[in-house]
Image (cartoon, helix red, strand yellow):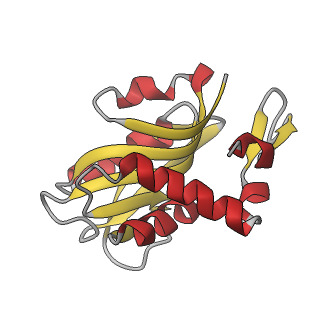
């Protein structure tokens, strides 16, 4: 299936020069969404995964169903101040700003194998921060899975020691 047929591209959003890849047009097509998750599952099922971590918010709509399909747990990576229990936090640069991500201190058990899942790999800042959080908690990042990769933004450069799996690639 050509998943790009289900991605809406919005020029100059959220600011001039950005070509936003909108996955909502894929998510609202049940069979297409299921196929995308099934294909990601096929790409990563050879890995030994104990839990999937997904960054807020679109990482939830990729990571949670992928965790369900693989029969493993899911843990959210949220923006600062959004989790109710004790957390660790790491600051990072966005494609167009700065932010902090957080995880509960007990979200990952030491030695657990973690797959990080999100909708998009762009500059790699969010995912590198997610990797940092998982590793601080004692987790072993075994891979990162995405629906979309924006290859010309070189996000893989920040994930050199991590296997990256993507459904779609935009140059």
Image quadrant of residue 167? top right
Image quadrant of residue 56? bottom right
Q: Is residue 163 above or below residue 75?
A: above
Q: Is residue 147 above or below residue 77?
A: above
Q: Is residue 94 above or below residue 160?
A: below
- Picture residue at 44% right of the left edge, 73% below the top: 83
- Picture residue at 34% right of the left edge, 35% below the top: 163
> Of all residues shown, which one is farthest toward the left?
111
> Of all residues shown, which one is farthest toward the front?
1
Q: Nearer the viewer, residue 130 or 160?
A: 160
- Could you tell me residue 40's position as x and y percent? 49, 51
- Picture residue at 24% right of the left edge, 71% below the top: 106
Can residue 56 be seen from the camera position used here? no
- Picture residue at 70% right of the left edge, 45% below the top: 3
Can residue 136 be seen from the camera position used here? yes
Q: Nearer the viewer, residue 59 or 143?
A: 143
- Could you tell me residue 93's position as x and y percent? 52, 37
> Of all residues shown, which one is farthest toward the bottom?
84
Image quadrant of residue 32? bottom right
- Could you tell me residue 18's position as x and y percent? 77, 31
- Could you tell me residue 134's position as x and y percent? 28, 53
């Amino acid at each position: 299936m050509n998943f790009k047929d289900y991605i809406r591209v919005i020029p100059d959003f959220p600011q001039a020069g950005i070509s936003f890849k909108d996955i909502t047009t894929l998510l609202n097509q049940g069979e297409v969404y299921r196929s995308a998750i099934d294909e990601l599952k096929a790409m990563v099922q050879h890995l030994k995964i104990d839990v999937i971590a997904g960054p807020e918010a679109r990482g939830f709509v990729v990571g949670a169903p992928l965790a369900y399909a693989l029969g493993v747990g899911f843990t959210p990576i949220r923006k600062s101040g959004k989790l109710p229990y004790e957390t660790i936090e790491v600051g990072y640069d966005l494609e167009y700003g700065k932010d902090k991500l957080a995880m509960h201190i007990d979200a990952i058990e030491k030695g657990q194998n973690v797959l990080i899942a999100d909708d998009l790999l762009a500059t790699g800042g969010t995912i590198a921060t997610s990797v940092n959080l998982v590793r601080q908690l004692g987790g072993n990042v075994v891979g990162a899975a995405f629906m979309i990769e924006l290859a010309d933004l070189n996000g893989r450069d920040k994930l050199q020691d991590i296997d990256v799996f993507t459904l779609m690639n935009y140059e």
